[in-house]
Amino acid sequence: MESVQDIIKQALLAGHKTLSEYDSKKILAAYGLPITREVWVNDPAAAEAAAAQIGYPVVLKVCAAGLAHKTEQGLIEVGIKNAGELKAAYARLAAHARQLEGGILVQELVKGSRELVMGLTRDPQLGPCVMFGLGGVFTEALEDVCFRVAPLDEEDALEMTREIKGRKILEGVRGLPPVQLDLLSRGLQTLGRIGLEHPAVRAIDVNPLIIQQGRPVAVDALIVLEKPPAEPAEAQGVRGGLDKLFEPQSVVVIGASQTPHKAGNDVIQNILANEFRGELYLVNPKGGEILGHKVYPSIQDLPQGIDMAIIILPAAATPQTIRDCAAKGVKAVVLAASGFAEVDQQGKTLQEETIQAIRETGVRVIGPNTSGHTSTPHNFTSSFFPLGKIPRGKVSYIAQTGNFATHTMRYIMSGENYGVARVVGMGNKLDVEESELLEYYAEDPETQAIFMYLESFKRPQRFLEVARRVTRSKPVVLLKGGATSEGARAAVAHTAALASDDRIIDGALRQAGIVRVYKYSHLILAAKAVSAMPLPLGNRVSFSAPSGAMLVCMTDLCRRHLGLRVPDLEEQTRQRLQEISPPYIRMRNPVDIWPAATVSGVEFAYREGTEAVLKDPNIDAVVPILMLTDDTGVPPLDFLVELAHRYPQKPIYVTFSAQKKHMDAAKAFLEPRGVPTFPLIEEPFEVLSILARCRQAMNRK
């Protein structure tokens, strides 16, 4: 390690930002990575001696600090078979080497038809991140790469090898032996170590990494350096104390209003509608009474020791109001006002003043620019959007938007049949942020599943650290806003050029066990499913449909896009399906149910067919696609509720090919009884894919 430190130190002192290939490989070799046999020389005789020692054929390369993309510049001679060719090649390359103040690298010719790439880049927020993918010319052409945040464990590294689209080449193909994944995994973990142990290493490229008899060998390597900046001391506010936000015994609304549909009135209406059992205080300079509650003219007139304040005042009043609240013993604050850093420079200055007030007082703050939060186990909400009584449930939301505390919650309340435990719209996240909320939800017995919408991470490394623990015990599903790339950064190293915020975030979330979704509606549909049914034990699905086309299309969807399996059924199950069906059809998974319905009736066919596959040990979840029309019949659906109770470990997600009125009626009947329904036939499969991945994350080593 001293030699590694010395190489880096000398290069930085000389002003070199890119190590030579020779020095780059010396660092890799010091960490145990397999590299080519090679010798650095600076005269023809030494080159000839090195070639004789290595054995022909050999490769000659110009080798100098700061030199990249040697092939494109014509600074490589490949496949030199004898001393005569060596002399000619050396003569051509020597002039370039002298000009670059470098030498010549004599290298063994590594033969192999499979080329990979691995590397490292230093993300400004997440630190060193390891990359793996297809190498050689395919690196830039296909960009088939993936990332993980250092440090990597063995499972992280192996998961990377399974993630690339070209993973088949790692297997034994066309008579080639399979790649030794243990060596590949070790190499990826090692790159992460280098990044963590040497802050001056900005990027590493190992490209190509050629597979020779199953062993990965680094044929070319490049290390980019950058003097590491001083680590800024993170300004930490007070931690803990979130119980005052989620379980306040007393609350004051500052900016209470007598006027209906103003924020200062709606928040009081919501608190009363949710039957908050604590003390409620109101502040307005006019005094008097609002909705049966006394109004205090000022904060100074309030009694001492109120747990929480909901401040609905103009943004400019925020810093002083926080200080006034703290002077009266208030421990937690919700800031509704907007007009801070999201607006202009004046707002940014005001935001800094607010942060200073928070640090001085030690109060815990949600917002500003938030529409509030909800805690149904405590019969409380601070939302100022007209909601009324919010149904209690076992899922919780963390959102960098006010939607889930306002109009999205209104939709859930009116259009779905599930409730929530906790909801927080974080706003500008001046104090309380996602990693702390995630940690709180992890310990919260009321929260059984966590759904998140984020556009940024305030403390990304802390967030991932918490998530890796939480996702082993509770499912965590995230929709990341602002995911599209603005283009790769211009960089010498492939790894840095291919890295985008979203690629790295995607790898980091997988590594932490967070299941990422890309549709806003999935935060609602998956929450509905997990509210009603257990997580599936795996990704094996059976479904029944009244149409062959649906069977084909949904099977394609499961296998090609959703990572779901549609496995063969046990023979006993298949025989039972055959018994209830006409002899002209051969039953299998998925289940063509309509022939049985035409013979024995719709209810009998769906009931017996669904139970048969629920019993099958090869199946983890079942999706009946119900045909409900005036002409074909609308059977009683009690049997689905009974089956859900009889087989509680296997979720049943119901969808339809039906008349709208019967779909609505089925939803109204089934969902209050614990069986979730989905109007579009793709939706239950999409949800099953999300929740099966949650189960996989919980089961990981």
Image (tube, grey):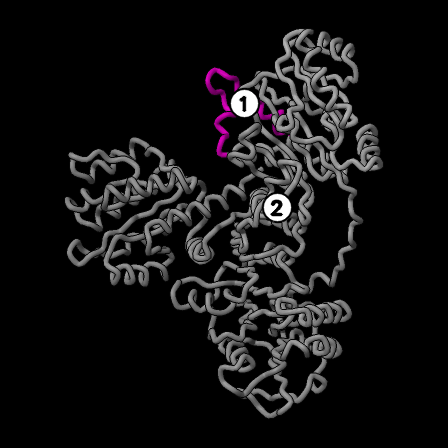
Element type at marker 1?
A: loop
Q: Is residue 150 above or below residue 479?
A: above
**Residue 264: within the magenta?**
no
Residue type marked 1: Arg
Camera-side residue of 487 and 198: 487
Does the CB distance between marks 1 and 2 fall below 8 Å? no
The residue where tag 2 is placed is 468
Residue 333 relative to residue 383: left or right: right
* Residue 259 coordinates in the image, percent (x, y): 52, 87
The structure residue drawn at horizontal position 75% and vertical position 78%, both measured from the top left corner, is 327
Neighbour tally class for label 2: few under 14, some 14-19, many 20 plus, Cα within 10 Å:
some
Q: Amino acid at mark 2?
A: Arg
Quadrant that contains the C terminus: top right
Q: Which residue is mark 1?
A: 114
Q: Closest to the observer: 89 or 315?
A: 89
Sequence-earlier tag: 1 or 2: 1
Q: Quadrant of residue 51?
A: top right
Q: How many marks?
A: 2
Q: Residue at x 33, y 58 (%)?
A: 670
Helix, strand or loop at disc 2?
helix
Where is residue 541 drawn, in percent x and y?
Answer: 37, 41
| Residue at the image position 38 percent from the left and 65 percent from the top | 415
Spot occupied by residue 494 in the image (x, y as percentages of width and height): 62, 36
Residue under the point 66% across and 37% down: 492
Label 1 or label 2, whichever lies nearer to me, is 1
Position of 38 relative to 678 (above/below): above
- Give the left or right position of residue 606, taking residue 694 as reference: left
Find the magenta span and give its range: 165-187
Any part of residue 363 in sight: no
